[in-house]
Image: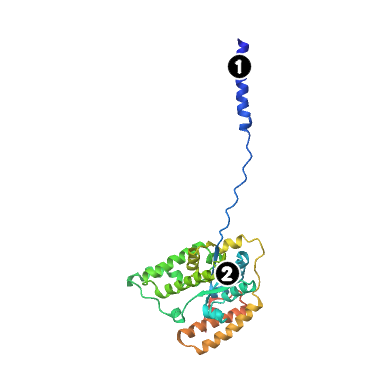
Amino acid sequence: MRRIASALLGAVVLAACTTACGPDMREKPKAPPCPPPPEPEHQSVVVGTIGKMHLVESRYELSRLGDVFAAFKPDLVLVAVRADALREDRLEDASFEMTYARHLAKARGVPVEPIDWFREDDLVASPAALEPYDVAEIERREAQLLHAPRLYTFEQANGAELSEKVLLAIGAAARHRGGDPLASRRRAWIQHLTADAVSRHGKPKRVLAFVDVLDRPAVDLVLRGVGYDGRMPVDVIAKAKEVLAAGDVPGEVLDAYRAQLARAKERAAKASGAEKSFWDERSRVLEVVVDKKAGCCVTQAALSTK
């Protein structure tokens, strides 16, 4: 009897051991990791530029625009230039970065479209009246960013934090100044021109825009609205796998700046009022651009009109 009991116990232990240590308890091979999701078919990058402050801020040199271009490889480039000025090759009408941006596109056979719109009178016009009058201090605090010097690094000008602050400041100005009609009209035209350019080119897969840092949220918003997946310029550069476009500004671009300076001075001499103020300011900035070869750095005072 004892032998039978021992045999039964041994069988139970053997069965338990077989179950615990059998093939079901062996470590199964790990499944291969899931592949990353495919990139969106339509992507956009909107680069916020800082105008004449590129000549002041050493951490945002003009060549950073070339870095983004080289990393992103766009199919269409949008520039903050008025339509007539681009068509007639009078880019002194725009901030000097746009000449460099157009050069980048032209050198690689990428089409360029203008998306800026403004009137010289609007640039020097008094802001719309405050409504009601007693919100002056609130509006000054909430919308101050729109009137401050654009002294930002590349990372700041093209990051989410500043973009959010700009959006909130624009909303504050609109609330307290009866819709801020002049600024609102200009942004509406920029967004219209952006959507129109994309449509006329058959909705290319990769769109790269170069605009003033304060216009960046509006352009990014409309591109997302027409079906593009927006990417941050900083992320695009960080993920680049090739040597980027750092280096001196090409001689061809510097020659263009010299020609623009001559035309800007000629127009300033013939103009009056708001138009003269506009061209005097353009002339002074282009003088520094030519002298510094579009590089850094000068003081902010050096950019003031004499």
Q: Is residue 151 visible?
A: no
Residue 284 in the image: state x and y as whole percent.
Answer: 55, 82
For the residues bearing labels 2 and 1, Cβ distance under 8 angstroms: no
Element class at badge 2: strand
**Is residue 236 in view from this perspective?**
yes
**Colour scheme of this structure image?**
rainbow
Judged left or right of residue 4, residue 222 is: left
- Kind of residue sitting beneath label 1: Leu
Relative image position of residue 45 (x, y in whole percent): 55, 65
- At 46% from the left and 67% from the top, the residue drawn is 166
Left or right: residue 195 versus residue 135 is right
- Image point 50% across, 65% down: which residue? 223
Front residue of this view, candidates 121 and 57 = 121
Residue under pointer 2: 76
In percent of width and height, residue 4 lies at 61, 12
Picture disc at residue 185: none
Q: CA distance from mark 2 to mark 1?
A: 81 Å
Q: How many marks?
A: 2
Q: Which mark is residue 8?
A: 1
Kindly identify the amino acid type of the residue bearing the numbered disc 2: Leu
Q: Position of residue 18 (x, y in %)?
A: 63, 26
Residue 137 is drawn in which quadrant?
bottom left
Q: Nearer the viewer, mark 2 or mark 1?
A: 2
